[in-house]
Image (cartoon, helix red, strand yellow):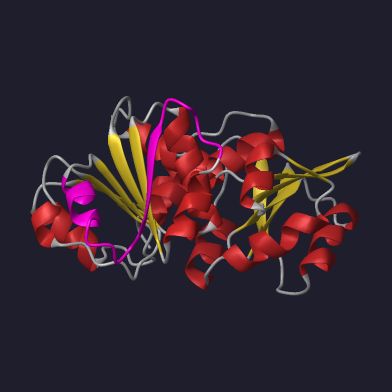
Amino acid sequence: MHLVAIVGPEPNLERVLQEHQDAKRRFHFHPVPAGPIKRILDSLFTLKFAGALLFDESLQQSAYPHIDRNNLDAREAEAVDTVTVTQGGTIGEYNQGRALGAALRAEGWDGKEAKAVIVGATPLARAAARDLSSIGIGHLTVLAENRPKAEAILEGLAASTITTARAANDPLIRSLLEQSDLLVRVDPAFEVPDDILGPHLTVVDFSPEAVSPLRRRALRLGSMTLNLRDIQGHHIASALHYILGDKIHPGPFLETLHKL
């Protein structure tokens, strides 16, 4: 059985992961006490961990320069949420963008030629933009604190994706929201008007609340919605796949996380 470190989750998430028992006894989650990230990464070798999952955004960013090899997603995000320990050193991955795509596909959502809006300018927003572009989104808008930050999120996407960068307070964003098929709210401070919600719009809200006010309103108005726990369940499964080299189904994690 492989030991997998969990670093930086909130207490409830740490508890349920530590209690999780893999039916095939392939891995066991073990929480690592808080401390300097370089020391935590160095300890993965001495304590014989197979890898680590990093949940805190500041930890993900501070870990990045201390990883021996980072994959393309991690390099673009300048953050790592998954660390694999190998004989040749550590490998860093950033899987949250893939987790978003996997969660949407699991609900039957087809992004081909769809219109999407991402709100936020974090590494997660960048990874989400990259994944949505890769699955064939036709038009992708990013709303951020200012237009240069939004433009930075959209750099280097597939040429087939039409992109728009706007400041979140731009009066023109309302029409973009009204025409969208998907809204991904990474920035929880962004207010979404009720009258753009409805069955035509899928809403992904990364708010830590189980049912945020946005999701509650979206559900009432007929939108399909996903929350942070939906993405985390797929992220954990994807991270374990890279660490262990084995296919891990997200179902058990989703079932557990939705009870929090």
Image quarter hosting the N terminus: top right
Q: Residue at x 15, y 62 (%)?
A: 193
The quarter of the picture where residue 84 lies is top right
Q: How many marks?
A: 0
Q: Position of residue 234 (x, y in %)?
A: 47, 42
Q: Residue at x 44, y 33 (%)?
A: 133
Asked if residue 61 lies left or right of residue 141, the reply is right
Q: Residue at x 33, y 63 (%)?
A: 168
Residue 206 seen from this side: yes
| Highlighted magenta segment, given as a residue range | 156-178
Image quarter hosting the C terminus: bottom left
Residue lying at the far bottom in this picture: please name it: 35
Q: Position of residue 48 (x, y in %)?
A: 85, 51
Asked if residue 109 lies left or right of residue 73, the reply is left
Q: Using the image as rendered, state which of residue 19 and residue 32 is in the foreground.
A: 32
State yes or no: residue 191 in magenta: no
Residue 99 seen from this side: no
Q: Using the image as rendered, state which of residue 220 and residue 186 is in the foreground.
A: 186
Q: Is residue 135 above or below residue 254?
A: above
Q: Is residue 108 above or below residue 82?
A: above
